[in-house]
Amino acid sequence: MENTENHGEIRIKIDDTLETTELFGSLDKNMKIINENFNVDIIQREDEVIVKGKDATRVEKILLELRKIIKSGETLDTQKVNYVIKLEKEDVSYSDNNMNKDIIGVTFQGKSIRPKTLGQKHYTDCMRKNDITFGVGPAGTGKTYLAIAMAVNAFKNKEVSKIILTRPAVEAGERLGFLPGDLQEKVDPYLRPLYDALFDIWGQESVARYKEREMIEIVPLAYMRGRTLDNSFIILDEAQNTTKEQMKMFLTRLGLGSKVVVTGDITQIDLPKGKDSGLKEVIKILQGIDGIAFSFLRESDIVRHQLVQKIINAYESYIIRDEE
């Protein structure tokens, strides 16, 4: 790809027709997104892309970033296009942060698992460098999935001998007795999101085999009391629904050779009235301690359907207006 510039017009030479198709997207949807954000005209002529307008240089940077994403083998979807545009407006480069190279693992279907946003990159770096990491942010930011991917990677590399996944079953005290089955069957609905992530990364047969060997545990938080967990990768999910006492109890389970990741969204607390969130308190207490890291993910780190980000923003705006 060669670039030439002449009086607010940039010409980008493209040799690969397939690359052009991926760059523009179905029905030119990627270029339409760029046009909505910048004052340019983008024209495709045979083996080159012509960018005209006062924002031509900025759009050139975006197109080169998108090309690097395509060359890396990542899927170029509209969400990623929007994210690259957002970074350009903040004068930040997507590729300079090496997200394309940060492969955590591979799913059961053979897809690479890697951070997709700068917030996620910071989160995975925190998990690598610290014994305890808190991933705090809204739904859809990959908090749980990336933590489980890191746990599987640590297990495969023999850095730990066990993976322990836990969640508080907030409604269990009232409703478990009405559910059919034994205790495990009663609590499984609360733990289903953890199973789903494991199945996606490892496959159901592998998960079942490791569970049978007790190399994987997926249990309610109450099961953690009284234990010391050595050589384990331990994930506490939905930590906003822990009480202050439960959070302290959980964190003091940390044993030798273990890592802990705590995930939660402090805007979705389901605790009964009168109960304070252990996650909200721990953010105030443990900041600045060596070996403990906090990674705060934002709406821009959401990697689900684009509407999820819009829904969260709309709810936050409504709450602010309601409080006023």
Image (spheres, rainbow, N blue to C red):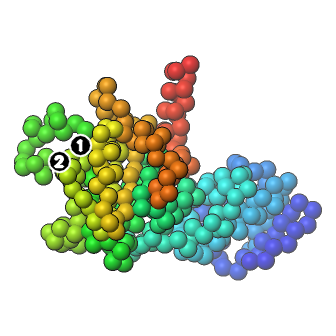
Q: Which residue is found at the position 32% from the left and 71% from the top?
A: 160
Residue 81 picture location, percent across and down: 61, 58
Residue 271 or residue 114, whichever sits in front? 271
Residue 106's quadrant in the figure? bottom left
The answer to which of marks 2 and 1 sits earlier in the sequence is 1
Is 165 situated left or right of 240 in this image?
A: left
Residue 30 picture location, percent across and down: 63, 58
Question: Which type of secondary structure does the marked residue at label 2 adopt?
Answer: helix
Is 1 situated left or right of 123 in this image?
A: right
Q: Which residue is found at the position 52% from the left and 33% from the top?
A: 316
Residue 218 or residue 186, whichever sits in front? 218
Residue type indicated by callout 2: Val
Residue on which disc 2 sits: 187
Q: Is residue 1 above or below residue 195?
A: below
- The answer to whether one can see residue 316 in this image is yes
Residue on which disc 1 sits: 169
Residue 148 or residue 30, whichever sits in front? 148
